[in-house]
Image (cartoon, grey):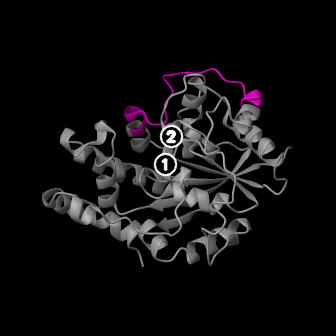
Amino acid sequence: MPEKIKIIYIAGTSRSGSTLLDMILGSAPEAFSLGEVSSYANYRAKQGAKIKKPNYHCTCGKFLDECIFWKNVNERVAFNYDESNSAHNNFSLLKFILTPKQSKIKNRSYDDYELYSAAIASAKESNSKVEYLVDSSKSPIRLRNILNNTRLEIFPIFLVRDGRGVINSLCRSSNKKWSLKNNNFGRALLLWVFTNLSISRLLKNNPHRIHISYEKFCRDPKPFLNKIKSLTNINLNLDNPLQTINTTFRHNLDGNVIKLNPPTEITKDEKWKHELPWAKRLLATTIMYPFHKKWVYLK
């Protein structure tokens, strides 16, 4: 039986710091960062479209069909795009949250093991030390599916940020569907609660599970990185985790645009404290209090 492919999977909601964590982990010589693999089907389906957005570039600066790494992956992966298959479909997510054990939403565009296998083979062509792939898709649906793939060994990281920060970050984005003007505060709040609830349920008894509070990580990343290092044996720089980010050649899909201009320091984004309207801030604080206590500001 072939050796299982090892995946470090970052689970959580959007705007939780997953791109930064992905880059830090991917800077280890034993790990290779792929970014948000859940975007692969859409990226591949849009080859040749040349969409002029930073997120539609690989971090090497090229489009997916021009990037040497992803061209090698594409040649090894059988692909048949199915537009109805989406890890972000709201109905599918709701069904999954209500019945996580029964719901298994298959990816009908490609085989996950085949994709990861092609990615690690392509990564090893330039770095033979690679043992782990880092996938920052965050999606609980994708997490559920790969956890059930016996040919994969998953090391899940449950990354949680203060929900008020997530709501504010989503609603101030350039994406009109999240704008506060479009009354999407409630939608963002429910997305944060239900996504994190489903991930928490999925990973409740997982022996490889690592829980990271965004707020505590920004204050002191060393304890969390040390846990990851102890579990996976990847060679992370605990004292200066950002030191090798700029010298690491990555091929990330999607994610925050900071992937194209990595930060020089880890700072906590608390703009929500003065940007989120006071009434919405109060409502979010009240509803999210028990979840914040359990996931974000835990002792």
Instruction: Decide: few, some or many residues near mark 2? Use Cα within 10 Å; few <14, some 14-19, many ≥20.
Output: some
**Magenta stretch?**
74-93
Q: Is residue 250 left or right of residue 267?
A: right
Image spot of residue 145 (x, y percent): 59, 41
Is residue 203 at all visible to an observer of this figure? no
Q: How far apart are labels 1 and 2 at the CA level?
A: 7 Å
Mark 1 or 2 closer to N-term?
Answer: 2
Residue at which label 2 appears: 55
Residue situated furthest left in the rendering:
279
The amino acid pointed to by label 1 is: Val
Residue at which label 1 appears: 257
Residue located at (76% from left, 27% from top):
75
**Mark 1 element type:** helix
Residue located at (58% from left, 62% from top):
209
| Label 1–label 2 contact, CB within 8 A | yes
**Mark 2 element type:** helix
Instruction: Decide: few, some or many residues near mark 1? Use Cα within 10 Å; few <14, some 14-19, many ≥20.
Output: few
Is residue 172 at all visible to an observer of this figure? yes
Q: Magenta: predominant secondary structure element? A: loop
Quadrant containing the N terminus in the rendered view: top right
Q: Nearer the viewer, residue 111 or 27?
A: 27
Image spot of residue 196 (x, y percent): 41, 54
The amino acid pointed to by label 2 is: Asn
Image spot of residue 8 (x, y percent): 64, 55
Question: Residue 275: which quarter of the image?
Answer: bottom left
Q: Is residue 299 left or right of residue 83?
A: left
**Residue 187 marker:** none
Quadrant containing the C terminus in the rendered view: bottom left
Q: Nearer the viewer, residue 109 or 149?
A: 109
Image spot of residue 6 (x, y percent): 72, 52
Specify whether residue 166 is painted magenta: no
Specify whether residue 87 is painted magenta: yes
